[in-house]
Each structure stands twice: as C-alpha cells, then as structure tokens.
Image (spheres, grey):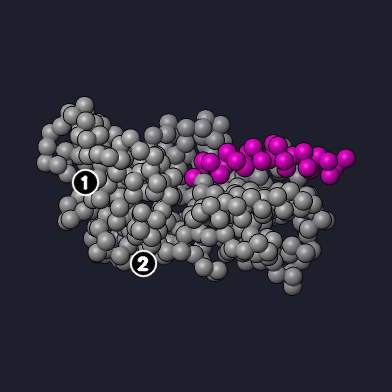
Amino acid sequence: MTDPDLVIVGAGLFGLTVAQQASEKLNAKVQIIDIRDHIGGNAYSYFDEETGIEIHKYGAHLFHTSNERVWEYVNRFTSFTDYVHRVYTTHNGEVFPLPINLGTINQFFHSAYSPSEAKALIEQQAGEYADVEPKNLNDQGIKLIGKPLYEAFIKNYTGKQWQTDPSELPASIIRRLPVRFNYNNHYFKDTHEGLPADGYTAWFERMIDDPNITVTLDTDFFDDSQSLSKNSLRGNVPIVYTGAIDRYFGYELGELKWRTVDFKKRYYKEVDHLGCPVMNYADPDIPYTRSIEFKNFNPERAEVAKQNKTIVWDEYSHFAHQGDEPYYPVNTEADRTMFAQYAAMEKKEPDVIFGGRLGSYAYFDMHQTINSALIAFEKQVEPLLNRQNR
C-alpha cells in the first residue's frame, strides 16, 4: 500500500467497521494494525482441528440486537443461524433456568405460584430493602429478587466474578437484574439474535475483503522499531485508536482497572457433556463461574454435532494485570475520575479518534460496538478525512 489515508489501531469490530466504511464511502486507503495474530478482537473464533468445533477464543460471543441499522449492516457480510440463547445454573446439585423467571421461582420453592402470587412473594421477601435506596450490590440484589433467591443464585456467583464480597460492590453492577414472572427463559430480549452461519472470523474477513484495506498483524503500535508506531504516525496521518486509553498516554495518570477471565479446556468422548451451551455455577465451592460447551451453539452443523467428541471450557474470573486480556471495566469512582482525565487529554491529540471498548473504558456488546463505530465514522472520521483531502 502507498501511504494510507487512515491508520486504525486494533482489528476488532470497531476498527473493522470504520475501515469498511472509510473504503466504501470515501475510497480511502486504510491500514489496520493489531498486536495479535488475528483479526476480530475478542470476538475472534477458530475451528478446533481435532473436532471441527468452532471455538470462541475469548469466551462465548452471542450476537443480538434491536438496532435495525446494525442488523441490516451485519447481514451484508454474514447470514445468521436461528440460535436463541438460554442459560442454566447449578445450585446445590440442582439445575435451574436463568434469568430468574416463574420456572426458577416455582422450582426453587417447590410451588406452583401464578405470576401475581410470585410477584407478591418476591416483594415480601425483599423485606426492609424494598423501600430503601440500596447502598451496595448486596442490598440491590435483595431488593430486586428477595433474599432467598439472591443468596442462592447471585451472591456467591457475583463474589466469584469480582473476587469481592457483594456488600463491597456498587449497586449499579446489577441495577437491571432481570426477573420475569412468566416462563420465558430467553436470555436476551432483542428483536434479532443468532450466530454467524460460517463463524465469526469468516464474517470479519468479508468486512475487509477490499483492495483499499491492508491488515498487518503481530504489530505493536508502541514499538518504535517498526514503521507503524505511535511516534512515527502521530501527527502525520489520521489515526483511529481502539487500544487501552491509559496505555496510549503511557499510564501517565495511572492504570485503569479491569477484570479478566482465564479458561481451562477439557475434552470429552461424549456427544454432549453439559446438555446446553452455557452452565453457570452459583455455589462458592466450585471455583469457576461457568462452563461453555461450544458444540451446543451450532446444532445445525450436523456432522460435528453428532460426533462422539466435545470440548468444554471452564471460566475463571480475576483482576487483570499488565499482560492479561482486559474484559470488563471495574469502573470504581476513582476509575471513572481517571478516565475523565484521560478523555480530556484525548481531545488534545492531533487527528486521533479513540473508540471501542478499550478506548472508551466501557463494556460493549458486539452490536453496541458496531453502532458506535458507524456513528464515529459519520461524526468524526469522515469529516476528518474530508478535511485532510481539501
């Protein structure tokens, strides 16, 4: 490629979407770089050589959206299966459906409550917490679903997720904890849901199958020994940066805190081990938060689905350190203050646009990332490139 019109740091969904739009709408020459050896960011998937099972390398990724613009956009590059996500949780040796719904409630209390009876029961079990402003996650959980259900399904699971007692976590973490007073156990409420028919990576490759777009992997933006470094590019070419915002500024104000997850892989000579794609473990004696059986995301792949082999990943949560993959922002008050200060510094950067999960210090679902990228292209990238070309 000759000198690019735009450099995008990070080949995740935000960067890929901006690159695709820049080429299509402006005929711009786009250079994407990524420190990893693959495109797609945390949504990247690959097919296991031994079994043919599609593995989501960074944990389960499930596409869903009610945003018609996003749905129309992604269907340009992939078709979707009719997969509908349902989750189950194991508590005291018994399996319950999630989110908490009338089936969960009646199974837990060995009853046959009607919707109105179940609602009255939950309100009663919220007790003194029903009419007070929650001070922490513990109070919020009890207020939303009552003490028995909260302690069975949320308290210990959340404690494992955050390695922190829920009484020390902010109520905002579960502000919208769903509880349904019917038997609907669909995990998402969105209009559209499914998995890319040919896998995530095939979808992403189609997005950038364009002579205007060049991808260079295994390339560190902060490595001055190579030409696509921050010090070589900054001020010389427009940049879309989707890496960690604190890393961009050399951790000048300190490090923003994240949670990360590790996985332990297990092979089984079974057609089906869990009986579902995702099983949560609500009790503290099991150290991992959930198990993922990737095979069960794609029952339509008959040859793979019927074979007597399967793979299960157990997911462990802990605080991220440098070198770990950051997944979820911790978002304490101190973190939010620090991010606001970095965001003020960002505005002074010459022709650099920050975006994506890491650049925004926010957790985004895939459809939210795509939507934010489409908006960023229209409001920031396109005007910037048009100015450059005058």
Question: What residue is drawn where x is 57% and y is 59%?
Answer: 256
The answer to whether residue 16 shows anywhere in this view is no
Residue 248 % position (x, y): 68, 60
Question: What residue is drawn where x is 21% and y is 46%?
Answer: 148
Is 70 positioned to the left or the right of 19 in the image?
A: left
Question: What residue is drawn where x is 17% and y is 52%?
Answer: 94
Callout 2 crowding tier (Cα within 10 Å): few <14, some 14–19, many ≥20 = few
Residue 210 % position (x, y): 67, 47
The answer to whether residue 346 shows anywhere in this view is yes
Residue range of the region highlighted in magenta in the rendering: 365-390
Residue 233 % position (x, y): 78, 59
Task: Say above or below: 1 vs 140.
Answer: below
Question: What residue is drawn where x is 68% and y is 64%?
Answer: 252
Residue where numbered disc 2 is placed:
264
Task: Say above or below: 81 vs 42.
Answer: above
Is 202 positioned to the left or the right of 153 in the image?
A: right
Q: Which mark is residue 148?
A: 1
Query: What kind of element bears circle 1?
Result: helix
